[in-house]
Amino acid sequence: MKARKLLAVSAAMVMGAAGLTACGGGGDDGGSASGDVEMTLWHNSTTGPGKAYWEDMVSAFAAENAGVTIKLQAIQNEDMDGKLQTALNSGDAPDLFMARGGGKLNAVVEAGQAQPLTIDDATRTAVGDAAFSAFTIDDEVYGMPMSILPGGIYYSKDLFAQAGITELPTTIEDLEAVVEQLKAADIAPIALGAKDAWPAAHWYYFFALRACSQETLDAATAEMTFDDPCWTKAGDDLAAFSATEPFNEGFLTTSAQQGAGSSAGLLANHQAAMELMGAWDPGVIASLTPDEKSLPDLGWFPFPTVSGGEGAEGAMMGGLDGMSCSKDAPAECSEFLNFLMTQENQEAYATAFQTLPASQDAQAVVTDPALKDVLATYNEAPYVSLWLDTLYGQNVGNALNAGVVNLLAGEGDSDAIVQGVVDAAAKE
Amino acid sequence: MSDTLGEGKLAVSPSPEASVTGGDGARKAPSPARRASGPDWRKRFEIALLTGPAIIMFVAFVIFPVVLAAYYGFFKWKGFGPPTEFVGLENYLTIFRDSTFQDALQHNAVIVVLSLVLQGPAAVLLALLLNQKMRGRSLVRVLIFVPYVVSEVIVGTGWSLMLQTNGAVNDLLTKAGLPDWTVDWLSDPNIAIWSLMLIITWKYIGFAVILFLAGLQSIPEELFEAAAIDGATYWQTQRRITLPLLGPTIRIWAFLSMIGALQLFDLVYIIWGQYVAATAGTSTMATYMVVNGRNAGNYGFGNAVAVVLFLISLVIALTYQRFVLKRDTEGALTEGKK
């Protein structure tokens, strides 16, 4: 073994610092009506059409607004949180950065690091109140929703046909029957990237969405208390479902999105039949198919109903990708975000990212059959909860994720999940 | 009669009135006629100039962060803006009450002991073997040393792919007609720690072998000749001459190995990811720190864990140096000018 670790860490810190200073720069000088304005924008599209979309938007905005330049910085999704934290602390924050609402954004706002946005009436009408609510703190909007990402089960139509499945499952018992049929046909039923924990936790969240009423979910957000019996029921339901061994072999060490061996990769290569995921999944799966094109037989159905729960029929859970402005950003920051929300630009966004745009005017551009099903269900849903780990913030989300992995590994039970959340509060 | 590493033996001990105790072993020239402070001052300037940059870097990137971590550890802090919520020792109480941390500490202890037990004897035997004249010696040396040079991330990724439930290892076992031998190498809590030890041994044994080979080079040939004339067998020679004279090298290697094992992070984090490590029984104090500190956004708590990890390593290191390395490093690390 070696004693070079400290040095390596310091070196990494130096590199990190160098990286940050390299992309720092102007933008803190505020915008005046006549002067030139420069802003920096951090996004997580390091390759392909997503990256091109941001470049197009920035040049289009500069063409309309002389004197405004926006510098783009693409950062790997997994690195984003850490880098943003460092940048916000060092007073060298990007003017525009990605945000997903909920507890994480709350922490940034509470620290006075984000500014309320000015939303045009046109934008407000196009997006609707539901999407804004995730970014609203004390009646001020701190983020512009760019896309809606409701979750559900993606499946391979070919593999379902191969196993002789004709009806899509609507109840959890149906789903268990489908799992049995797939196993009988020697197909791995459900791909699960439990190594990253959050995909495993999604299963618990959806069982909680079925077990708990909207009031209970809201109360948990407000008070961070999880003593309602429905939380235990959700864990028990998951444990019972997990006992039927529905997940791919070695799911505990399967990652979610990296390479052909990941859960998205298993679906992309017809190695597994289903995956519970958010609406970014078609795009991720497309990047992992052998020809790097969309999976032609990809279908979608909502999370099945579970008997005995208090959740409303048809309730959904999902996330939002959005952009926020940091505290020192010039007024042009809000202008640019409203510019992104025009119908044309939102259509471009939906096409580039193969996802659902937040603006309802732009939703006609969605052609992917699986995404169309998602959209239809979404527009019917009585309410849409944010992913619970996003909603409850990093600390509790972290504890929930760990508890669910333990439960699936047979190391803990539903009470241990709730206890883990209580323990996490002590570390906050 | 052990040949120590210390250079104090060779240097003529400086006269008591010399103000600069440079262990440079320079011959004490008769003092020049000019008893000005010039040379003395110039020497100090030279020392400052040569060591200054290194000291500044060390203080800025090692000492200062350690002090800051100690400071942040007394706060509940989300990592935005300056910490305000002072909680005293509460974070530390939480750490020691947390069963997840106790598990991680236990895993660390197991890794420390097993690293020594598995790598030490094997490395000594390999070093003895590779010290012989034989065909293909350089090739074997390279093969043993290569894993140590490859980066941890690559090693971790490679092994994690091979050891997956559907990975190459299980596939090989099945095709070799041993389907009963296939297990969940990574996710079965009874097996995971042994998989980790296998990877650690494979990766770091090259370092031990190279150290021991260097140590063997420094043993005078005459001793072996004398032993041969006295009729000692090969194994007697190894036991009575080689091992005792290799002692300092073995002790230093054990020290480095222990520190490395205490701070093990990268392999575990890459192979098991942030959550499964605790479930599989391979979490270490360092992975606990990252998961419950940085990833949970509890920066105050995470810093407290860092301090605990630092103190545990420091106490073990100082104890080891005080009682085990004392003879080997006489005068090099301590002020022991007895």
Image: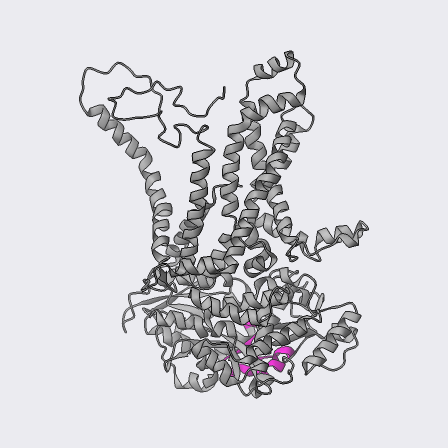
Q: Which residues are magenta?
A: A352-375
Q: Is residue B32 left or right of residue B79?
A: left
Q: Position of residue B184 (x, y in %)?
A: 69, 56
| Vertical placement of residue A59 versus A139, above or below | above
The residue under the point 50% across, 70% down is A421
- Give the overall secondary structure of the magenta segment: helix
Question: Is-magenta flag for residue A195?
Answer: no
Q: Which quadrant holds residue B7?
A: top left
Q: Residue furthest top?
A: B229
Q: Position of residue A279 (x, y in %)?
A: 58, 75
| Vertical placement of residue A19 versus A353, above or below | above
Q: Position of residue B235 (x, y in %)?
A: 66, 23
Return the residue nearer the eye: A323 or B123. B123
Residue A55 visible in the current orientation? no
Residue B102 visible in the current orientation? yes
Return the residue nearer the eye: A354 or A206. A206
Question: Is-magenta flag for residue A353?
Answer: yes
